[in-house]
Image: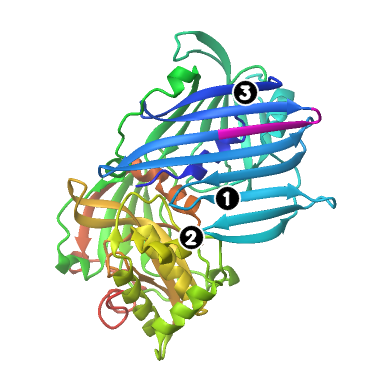
Amino acid sequence: MRCRLAVLAALWCLLVAPASAERRWMTVLLDGRKVGTLRIDRDADGGAVTTTQALDLRLTRANSPLLLRSSVTAVESRDGAPLAFDASGNMSALENRVEGRARPEGAFQVTRTVGGQSTVGLLIWPTGASLVEGQRLIAVARGFVAGTTYPVRNFDVVKQQVADVKVDVVGNDTLVMPDGTRETLHHLRQSLPGVPGAAPVDVWVDDEGAIRRSISPLLGFRLEMISCSEACATAPDQDVDVLRAAMIDAPRPLTPNFRVQPMRYTVRVAGGTPHPFIETDEQHVTSLGDGVYVIDVGFARRGKETAPAADDTAPSPWLQADSPRIGELARSIAGDAHSDLQRMRRLRAWVSDFIDRKGLDIGYASALETLDTRAGDCTEHAVLLTALARSLGIPARVVTGVVYVERLGGASRVFVPHAWSQAFIDGRWISFDSAQRRFDSTHIALGSGNGDPWRFFATMTTLGHIRVDQAVPSSSIVDLPASAEGGFVGAAGAGGGR
């Protein structure tokens, strides 16, 4: 399991040092174990304030090391007006980058480079949105009186989106910092009202609005960043296996004869976590209250989901469906196929064979990069297959969730984080899994999107809170869903070999 770097963007938006030129350090912890370093440089020169945050993370996935580095820079006027921004990261072998520069008419020219391919577009700055310095100024202006509540519009450089954040001033806390000193800091709680599954982030700031400590959920862990000396922040990291922590034990062995028929799961979500599952044409979710859900997987239900939108056939930075290489390859694979279902089956089979180096050492690669390296795990399979489908005009998307495996990383009979593709065919969304070579009823969906990595990691924040209590095959289910259309969607006929 990877660490989604975009989940830190909300924290980066407030991390700032108030001095005219200063370097600050923070140590990064997962459940109390050191996994990284954050360095913050702030330079107020003339009429501009430049803030750069460089994050280094060292994680482990099933004994495979994963070294991740990202950097975010914001340039703003003294009063917080945005002037420029940059973000870069190495989630795969190639550096991915976003660069934004203000134009004279007020718009921003944004250049985004993913997988070696660059796209240029214009961004109309969202009303009221701010970057690092602007958000710090808002926090100071609003004050730190307990009970104060106010909105902030955080512009996320990585996602290129605005997050409408609600800030609650909790009060003042005295904390013991890593160097042993005691500091009285202002406790703020940031939340995203109306966003399902969005957990709050707690931050502690000084009188200048600079964050000294933060706590947020990440992949089932407690992610903490706390200010300390350079020696403390750059001390050796510790091993944390994020894949093992994200696994969910199965209540029983799910043998092949179970997987080819619909399944019903009883799932418990702890800690008051919001509803983490999605409804699809293959998955129906019923809430029983108190964090307990019944999930039926494998019944074909035409029209449960909305019809595809224009975005479902459009290219995206990670699904480069407009690349001539992607399009020509997809047409050659599809050949004389006479239907979209047959085209998708051929694409799925080709991707399953094409990616011949399976590994957990890749953070998240785009379709074009995967085409060059032939390496990756489930996410690389999903983005490449989805891009190939979109290049043929077939509406397709990347689905994220969990899937059952007999054995992985020293664990047995567990559900593990997973990604696969869905295509809209004959009036409903149908799943195709090139990494597993077949979609079956052990796939439980948590989210879907256009292949951006932050969407994948956003759905994974609840994994540490999910427990599967029961898994029952359809042959044992008395009250089969009334809307089922005659059997398992993964069986031969409807979508065998998907």
- Of badges 2 and 1, nearer the viewer stands 1
Q: Quadrant of the C terminus?
A: bottom left
Q: Is residue 50 magenta?
A: yes
Instruction: Say which mark, if any, is on residue 379.
Output: none
Residue 305 vs residue 404: left or right? right
Residue sitting at the far right: 105
* Residue with the mark numbered 2: 451
Q: Nearer the viewer, residue 24 or 313?
A: 24
Q: Nearer the viewer, residue 293 or 59?
A: 59
In this view of the protein, can residue 126 be seen by the observer?
A: no
| Mark pair 2, 1: CA separation | 16 Å
Place of residue 290 in the rendered image (x, y in percent of width and height, measured from the top left): 37, 43
Q: Is residue 171 magenta?
A: no
- Of badges 3 and 1, nearer the viewer stands 1
Whichever of labels 3 and 1 marks the residue nearer the N terminus, that label is 1
Residue 77 vs residue 233: left or right? right
Q: Residues within 10 Å of mark 1 (few under 14, many from 20)?
A: many
Place of residue 295 in the rendered image (x, y in percent of width and height, measured from the top left): 32, 58
Which residues fall within the magenta stretch?
46-53
Q: Residues within 10 Å of mark 3 (few under 14, many from 20)?
A: many
Question: What type of secondary structure mainly makes up the magenta span?
Answer: strand
Badge 1 marks a residue whose secondary structure is strand
Badge 2 marks a residue whose secondary structure is loop
Residue 240 vs residue 400: left or right? left
* Residue with the mark numbered 1: 97
Q: Check disc 3 and give the amino acid type.
A: Ala
Specify the quadrant of the image occupied by residue 133. top right
* Residue with the mark numbered 3: 210
Q: Check disc 2 and give the amino acid type.
A: Gly
